[in-house]
Image (spheres, rainbow, N blue to C red):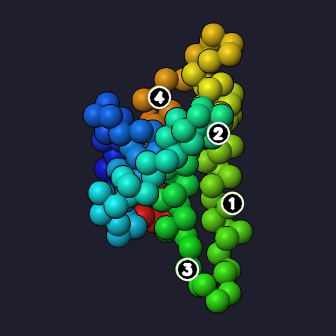
């Protein structure tokens, strides 16, 4: 399957928040329509709305991983640990590349030094998500 990184960055340019840009780009892989995914991830942008939290692009990628990996076993939840490990992989790769996971640090709000632009954060999270999807034989 062809990379969708540019598609995610284009969505960001159209006004999607970072979480929406990533999650909506891959939503067909988890059987969710784009409008529903857009609505579900709206609150995850801008570091969960206040720049204090994890970059929305990472949150969007982790949402896709949850949909892909979860067994949805409500009686005996059994996939949480494995899903968290996949999310951790994206977080570690992102932090290794960009020094931080926190939106306001990435944007240089306190330091004045921008570590990564939003479109680049979307591209990075998409790249790391695609690596996991390829390992799982999905892309």
Q: Looking at the picture, does residue 9 appear above or below residue 69?
A: above
Helix, strand or loop status at disc 1: helix
Say which residue label 3 marks.
Answer: 72
Name the quadrant containing residue 10.
top left
Give SS at disc 2: loop
| Mark 1 or mark 4, earlier in chain | 1
Mark found first going from the N terminus, 2 or 3:
2
Q: Position of residue 119 (x, y in %)?
A: 42, 29
Q: Earlier in the sequence, mark 4 or mark 3?
A: 3
Name the disc covering residue 53, or none.
Answer: 2
Callout in the foreground (1, 3)? 3
Dots 1 and 4: beta carbons under 8 Å? no
Which of disc 3 and disc 1 is earlier in sequence?
A: 3
In what quadrant of the picture does the C terminus appear? bottom left
Residue tagged 1 = 85
Residue 22 placement (x, y as % from top left)? 42, 46
Query: Distance of mark 1 from mark 3, alpha carbons?
Result: 17 Å
Residue 37 falls in image quadrant: bottom left
Number of other residues with Cα within 10 Å of mark 1, as a class: few under 14, some 14 to 19, many 20 or more = few
Q: How many marks?
A: 4
Residue shown at 46%/45% (left/top)?
19
* Residue matched to label 4: 118
Q: Residue at x 36, y 52 (%)?
A: 38
Q: In whole angstroms, how far apart are the C-alphas of marks 2 and 4?
A: 14 Å
Q: Mark 4 falls on what kind of element?
A: helix
Mark 2–mark 3 Cα distance, whole angstroms, equals: 26 Å
Query: Mark 2, mark 3: which one is toward the viewer?
Result: 2
Residue contact between numbered discs 2 and 3, judged by CB atoms under 8 Å = no
For residue 110, which numbered disc appears in the image?
A: none
């Amino acid at each position: 399957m062809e990379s969708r990184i540019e598609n995610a960055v284009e969505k960001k340019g159209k006004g999607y928040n970072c979480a929406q840009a990533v999650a909506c780009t891959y939503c067909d892989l988890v059987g969710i329509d784009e409008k529903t995914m857009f609505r579900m991830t709206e609150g995850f942008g801008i570091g969960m709305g206040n720049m204090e939290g994890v970059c929305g692009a990472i949150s969007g990628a982790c949402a896709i991983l949850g949909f892909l990996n979860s067994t949805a076993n409500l009686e005996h939840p059994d996939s949480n640990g494995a899903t968290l490990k996949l999310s951790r992989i994206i977080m570690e790769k992102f932090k290794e590349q960009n020094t931080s996971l926190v939106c306001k640090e990435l944007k240089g709000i306190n330091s004045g030094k921008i570590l990564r632009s939003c479109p680049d954060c979307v591209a990075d999270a998409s790249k790391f998500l695609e690596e996991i999807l390829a390992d799982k034989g999905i892309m």
